[in-house]
Image (cartoon, rainbow, N blue to C red):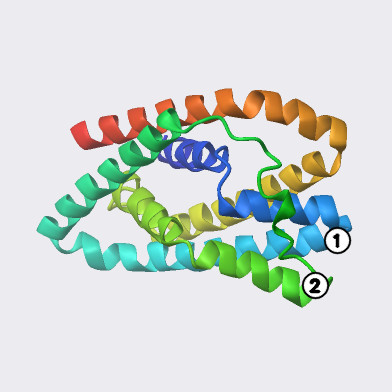
Amino acid sequence: MEFVLIASAHFLALLSPGPDFFLIMQTALRMPMRYALSVCAGIAAANGLYLTIAVLGLEAVRNMHLLMTVLKYLGSGYLIYIGYLLLRAPKRPLTQNEKQGFLRQQSFIRQFTLGFASACLNPKNAIFYLSLFTVMVSAETPLAIRTLYGLWMAGIVFTWDMGVAMLIGNRRAKNYLEKWIFGLEKISGLMLSLFGILLCLD
């Protein structure tokens, strides 16, 4: 049950397009798919770094009851806040950033670095993973199981991002996704808000 909750919250967060989404979109549209793969690998690596911090740092915060309680409510509030932002976000076209041409050099290392920097320099990733592990993962969950949670989420980030790149690389599929992304964003916002409320009341 714990895995289902944490995996569901993580997947719902992936549904909303953010900076990483637009970076993947530009790469998929302007470069061969192998460079989109490199960007996705960089994003997954940065997420893996934050997941490692969240997994290893969990024991320390659990030994401090007051801090644990504060983190619980901060984590719940953060989930509610992200849900609120998604619910009130205006409709945005998927091609919004197409003309920003910052992808000029075709290099595996460059694209990996761009993907890594995009995810690593976004503080919401660190806060989200720490909130997720602090609030949803039981104190009795062994380190090995938490590590598997982290590996699963890093793998899902990579798989999801590659799926997005492949969809956007296909013009007809991209046009279809553009018609539905607004509704998916609202559903994600509602579910994340509900997760935050339920966790706060737990």
Q: Quadrant of the N terminus?
A: top left
Up the image or down, 55 lies above or below 201; here it is: below
Residues marked 2 and 1 touching at CB (< 8 Å): yes
Residue 119 at what x, y percent from top left? 55, 62
Give me the disc on residue 34. Answer: 1
| Residue 95 coordinates in the image, percent (x, y) | 71, 42
User: Which residue is painted at 31% across and 62% down in the image?
Assistant: 58
The one nearer the camera, 135 or 101, is 101
x%, y% of residue 40? Answer: 70, 58
- Which image quarter: residue 33? bottom right
Name the residue tied to disc 2.
108
**For mark 2, does the 10 Å Cα neighbourhood hold few (<14), some (14 to 19), or many (20 or more) residues?**
some
Position of residue 137 relative to residue 100, above or below, is above
86 sits left or right of 112 in the view = left
Q: Earlier in the sequence, mark 2 or mark 1?
A: 1
Residue drawn at (23%, 49%) of the image: 74
Note whether residue 141 is visible. no
Type of amino acid at the residue the image marks with label 2: Phe
User: Residue lying farthest right?
Assistant: 32
> Count of labels shown?
2
Q: Amino acid at mark 1?
A: Arg
